């Protein structure tokens, strides 16, 4: 179970990272990979939370932009194999 103090700390991290938003799909993917490394290699959950909060904000902004302008090109997967 997560303690209340921990949740408050996580909320403040989310608020702080909003001041440094992700602006591109490539940047978003890099942040996801770095968050994985933070957890897998360094057991650094707090840094991973910061990165994933930035990713979440980017996803919300992209979804809102597509909702506002359906003609806007949607991000496409760039990790697909070229065959």
Image (tube, rainbow, N blue to C red):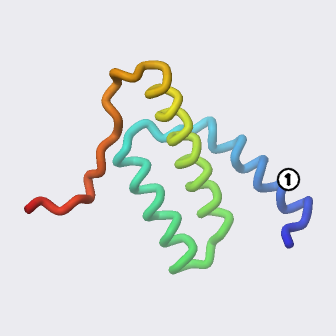
* Residue 76 placement, left or right of 10: left
Q: Mark 1 points at which residue?
A: 8
Q: How many marks?
A: 1
Q: Is residue 68 above or below residue 23?
A: above
* Residue occupying image coordinates x 43% and y 64%: 33
* Residue 13 placement, left or right of 81: right
Give residue 81's position: percent from left, percent from top.
Answer: 17, 62
Q: Within the image, what quadrant is residue 80 found in?
A: bottom left
Quadrant including the C terminus: bottom left
* Residue 37 placement, left or right of 5: left
Q: In this view, does 27 lie above or below 44?
A: above
Give residue 53's position: percent from left, percent from top.
Answer: 61, 50
Q: Within the image, what quadrant is residue 60 found in?
A: top right
Give residue 19's position: percent from left, percent from top.
Answer: 62, 35
CA neighbours of label 1 inside 10 A, class few (<14), some (14 to 19), many (20+): few
Q: In this view, does 66 lie above or below 59?
A: above
* Residue occupying image coordinates x 85% and y 53%: 8
* Residue occupying image coordinates x 53% and y 38%: 21
* Residue occupying image coordinates x 61% and y 78%: 43
Give residue 15's position: percent from left, percent from top.
Answer: 72, 41
Query: At numbered mark 1, what does the secondary structure look like: helix, strand or loop?
Result: helix
């Amino acid at each position: 179970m997560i303690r209340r103090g921990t949740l408050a700390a996580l909320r403040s991290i989310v608020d702080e990272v909003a001041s440094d938003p992700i602006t591109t799909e490539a940047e978003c993917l890099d942040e996801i990979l770095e968050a994985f490394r933070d957890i897998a290699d360094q057991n650094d959950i707090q840094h991973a939370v910061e990165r994933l909060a930035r990713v979440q904000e980017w996803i919300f902004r992209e979804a809102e932009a597509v909702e506002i302008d359906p003609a806007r090109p949607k991000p496409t997967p760039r990790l697909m194999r070229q065959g």
